[in-house]
Image: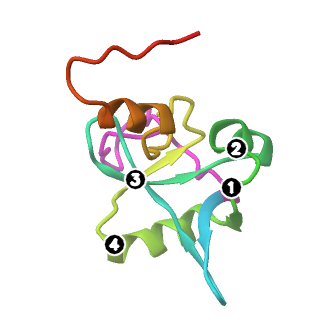
């Protein structure tokens, strides 16, 4: 992931070469696949691509739909969405936000002062 902007005369850029073809997480539609946009730990929006299917499934799960795009095409698709960052092969991810579990919802419905027994 490149978080820094480099000038063309930088002698040692962090990412000197394009990433090449990437496996990009998407959301299937009726006729198209929409590229998913993620957030960095600091809250910035970022496009994400993986160099192998194995890395994508290890991070996002085997059920995650994907499409194969070049880095330049992924950047071009993200640009109208005001997404300037591209993260390649992210290794740290947070679990997906899910609805509260049934037990958590049940505990909220108990009247105050009652203790739930567990076995």
| Distance from the alpha carbon under mark 3 to that under mark 2 | 19 Å
Residues at marks 2 and 1 touching, judged by CB atoms closer than 8 Å: yes
Q: Earlier in the sequence, mark 3 or mark 1?
A: 3
Spatial CA distance of label 3 from label 4 is 10 Å
**Colour scheme in use:** rainbow
Q: What is the secondary structure assignment of the residue under circle 3? A: strand
Q: What secondary structure is the stretch in magenta mostly built from?
A: loop
Q: Is residue 79 above or below residue 119?
A: below
Of the residues under marks 3 and 4, which one precedes in the sequence? 3
Whether label 3 touches label 1, CB < 8 Å = no
Q: Position of residue 20 (x, y in %)?
A: 67, 56
Label 4 to label 1: alpha-carbon separation: 21 Å
Would you say 61 lies left or right of 80 here?
right
C-alpha gap between disc 2 and disc 1:
6 Å
Q: Which mark is residue 61?
A: 2
The picture quadrant where one finds residue 111 is: top left
**Residue depicted at x 63% and y 59%:** 24
**Extreme residue in the top direction:** 119
Which residue is at the front of the view, 29 or 88?
Answer: 29
**Residue 34 percent across, percent down from the top left:** 55, 74
Over which residues does the magenta segment extend? 1-23
* Closer mark to the observer between disc 3 and disc 1: 1
Horizontally, residue 65 falls left or right of residue 95, namely right
> Is 42 rendered above or below residue 7?
above
Measured Cα–Cα span from mark 3 to mark 1: 17 Å
- SS at circle 4: helix
Residue located beneath label 1 in the image: 64
Please give the label number shown on residue 46.
3
Quick one: which residue is furthest to the left in this view? 112
Query: Based on the displayed image, in which of its 4 quarters is residue 13 positioned?
Result: top left
The residue carrying mark 4 is 81
């Amino acid at each position: 992931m490149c978080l820094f902007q480099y000038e063309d005369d930088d002698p040692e850029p962090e990412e000197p070469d394009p990433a090449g073809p990437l496996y990009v997480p998407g959301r299937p539609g009726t006729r198209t696949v929409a590229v998913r946009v993620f957030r960095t730990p600091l809250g910035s929006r970022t496009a994400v691509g993986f160099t192998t299917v194995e890395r994508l499934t290890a991070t996002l799960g085997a059920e995650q739909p994907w499409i194969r795009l070049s880095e330049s095409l992924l950047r071009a698709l993200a640009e109208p969405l005001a997404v300037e960052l591209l993260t390649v092969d992210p290794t740290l991810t947070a679990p997906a936000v899910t609805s509260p579990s049934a037990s958590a919802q049940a505990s909220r419905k108990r009247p105050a002062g009652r203790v739930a027994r567990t076995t």
